Amino acid sequence: MGETTTGSGKREPSRTAKLARGIAIAAVIVLPMALGFGPELCQEMEDRDVIENGVLAEARILDLEDTGNRMNDNPEVLFDLEIDLREGGTYRAAHRTYMSPVDIVKYRPGETVNVKYDPADPSRVVLLPW
């Protein structure tokens, strides 16, 4: 079972066995890549959605810290922000992003930056580039 016999008498794996082997090989290769890069890709897609569809606002940087994570030698920075809503009021939100060390020095606590936020889920905030 799982094999077929050719006209020459040789046994070859059946089509189902070949398919199962191919799936197993793909899983061994693709799964680790998905686990490694998946979270960053998902975050990038969410950020892109907020940039395209979000509401522009100003935010004050309350704090920023290097999380210790790196991607392409760029540190992941966690921003603690106080967002000014156009309709009045403020709220606090956090934003994580990978950033060049050259760009990090442009941001200081107390400074005002432009952000976009998702009005349906205000916790989704993206810091806009200078």
Image (cartoon, rainbow, N blue to C red):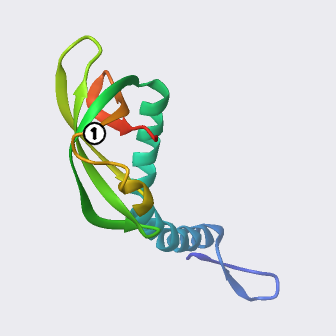
Which residue is found at the position 43% from the left and 70% from the top? 73
Q: Nearer the viewer, residue 95 or 106?
A: 106
Residue situated furthest top in the rendering:
87
Q: Is residue 6 above or below residue 107?
A: below
Q: Is residue 128 above or below residue 71?
A: above
State the residue position of label 1: 111
Query: Which quarter of the figure has residue 8?
Result: bottom right
Q: Is residue 6 above or below residue 95?
A: below
| Residue 100 seen from this side | no
What's under tag 1, amino acid-wise?
Glu
| Residue 24 seen from this side | yes
Quarter of the figure with the N terminus: bottom right
111 lies left or right of 32: left
Percent x, y for residue 90? 18, 23
How busy is the neighbourhood of tag 1: few (under 14 within 10 Å), some, or many (20 plus)?
Answer: few
13 lies left or right of 52: right
Q: Nearer the viewer, residue 43 or 38?
A: 43
Query: Which quarter of the figure has residue 50?
Result: top left
